[in-house]
Image (cartoon, helix red, strand yellow):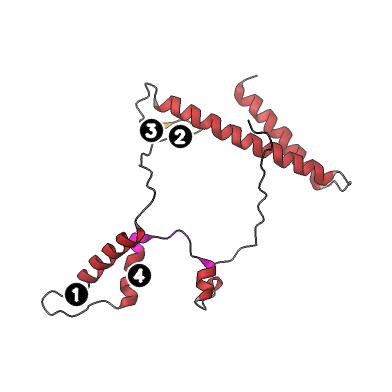
Amino acid sequence: MTLRQDLDDILDRLDMACLDERGASDEDRSMRLLHLGFILNEAKKRVSSILKETEAILINSDWDQSPYETQLFSIETKTGAPRKKWDHKTLANLVAKKITDKAIDMDTGEVLKTPQQMIQELLIYAAPSYWRVAALKELGIDPDDFCEVGEPLTNLIYRSNNNE
């Protein structure tokens, strides 16, 4: 059996274990599901670790990092430097100044954009990935009026008690 076939077999078994629980109603069902969730979470961590190591080995290999494509998958590289500890206040002030400078006609001094237009332009550069729901509510704004609201999600956080 190949590594791929072994993995498919294990994943099929895990999938069946989950599907078997759909119709189960015995008193041990919750315990089995808790343990299955833990096993899957541990597997996810190990797979993530193996993937990270595999990618590091590949990047440091003689592969020229050109795009690669097969019938099964394709891969390309993207390089970007991690950016942390932004000076949001200074950067926001600088961007706001440039936006306001561009909004003023240099010949007449007339302001060509409304404050709302300038704020919208700021969002082009800032691009927040989420809105702060609690902060919007403090302003008396219902965030649900401005987005599609899905069903509430409950996440289970598994933590291993094994300190390895």
- Disc 3 is placed on an element classified as loop
The amino acid at mark 3 is Pro
Q: Name the residue under label 3.
A: 67
Mark 4–mark 1 CB contact (< 8 Å): no
Q: Name the residue under label 2.
A: 74
Task: Compare marks 3 and 4 and give the one earlier in the sequence.
Answer: 3
Name the front one of labels 4 and 2: 4
Image quadrant of residue 149?
Answer: bottom right
Q: What stretch is highlighted in magenta?
A: 124-133
Q: Name the residue under label 4.
A: 120
Residue name at image x 21 percent, y 79 percent: 111
| Image quadrant containing the N terminus | top right
Label 3 to label 4, Cα distance in Å? Answer: 37 Å
**Which disc number belongs to residue 104?**
1
Closest to the observer, 115 or 13:
115
Check the image and name the residue furthest to the top.
1
Task: Compare marks 3 and 1 and give the one earlier in the sequence.
Answer: 3
